[in-house]
Amino acid sequence: MIDLHCHTAISDNSFTIEQVIQMAKQNGIKHLAITDHDTTVGLERAIQIGKELAVNIIPGIEISAYDYKRGRRAHILGLNIIPGHEAITKLCQPLIERRHQASFQMVQKLRENGYTLTWEEVEHLASGGTGVYKQHIMHVLLNKGYTDRIYGELYKKLFAKGTNIENQGLAYVSIDYIDVYDAIRVIKEAGGVAVLAHPGQFNNFEAVSEWTKEGLEGIEVKHPLHTKIDEEKALALAEQYNLVKTGGSDFHGFYSDTGSDVGSVTIAEAWLEELMVRQEKTQRI
């Protein structure tokens, strides 16, 4: 079995690298891509653990990008990248710092509005990772009885973006994401294959024709949030623009909004072979 989209506690999964790979082993996964948000930290350790457990780890990343032309988010997966590549670190580290600072501001807003939590409590849940995410904040609120789930009405009440100050979340803080073209560029510089993640989630389908000209080489077809129509659109675009097809569980553990488990969404071996061939061509260019 092959799962090409999975996170760990380095970003916003509730389980550590060791735990995730152990779960993959138990679930029969032979090939697993670790694609934490905006970082390659932990990939070398993951590869070593994978060797010990006979799980082939494909080093990856999921860059939190933005399509400024259309005004919507876009996530770009980098598969088979070089861990620790300078181009990725230079581009993504400022975003990691912005997200962490935004989370601090969110906690302060919550405290000002009567929620009894501390920054230290939130940071503790994110220890060992690259910073605090909204999921960590929600986990503390869950522990304190404010809600019974990570994602739900309270999450929307606190963090909804909204169109103006009247309908945005109580603790909403904006973050400047990475330009999608820069995300594609650094993945190529790091020797990887740039893949559009879950295009159905942010409705990125119409941008594919432009992004392929800039180096996009793949599209995620199989994803727990994709409908049958989303899959058909992705498959059609893959055929039209000669893109490799990928898929995965997008596993986040307790912090998942899909209910997926590692290996719950998998792809055919032929798709992985196409990815490896494309990656070899990318490295020769």
Image: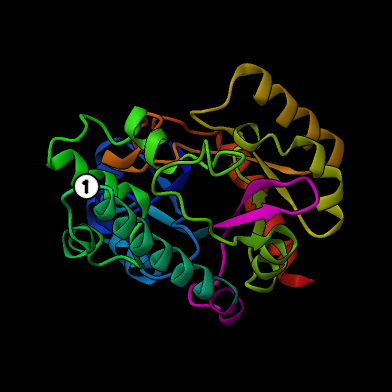
Residue denoted by label 1:
114
Residue 81 among those drawn in magenta: yes
Q: Nearer the viewer, residue 57 or 265?
A: 265
- Residue 272 occupies quadrant: top right
Instruction: Report the quarter where the N terminus lies.
Output: top left
What is the quadrant of the C terminus in the image?
A: bottom right
Residue at disc 1, secondary structure:
loop
The relative height of residue 76 versus residue 268 in the rendered view (above or below) is below
| Side of 242 relative to 65 (left or right) | right
For the residue marked with disc 1, what is the amino acid?
Gly
**Residues shaded magenta:** 63-90
- Image coordinates for residue 165, horizontal then vertical, percent: 54, 44
| Residue at x-position 72% and y-position 67% | 185
At 66% from the left and 24% from the top, the residue drawn is 230
Residue 80 as seen in the image, left or right of residue 199: left
- Is any atom of residue 152 visible in this view? no
User: Where is residue 187 drawn, in percent x and y?
Assistant: 65, 66
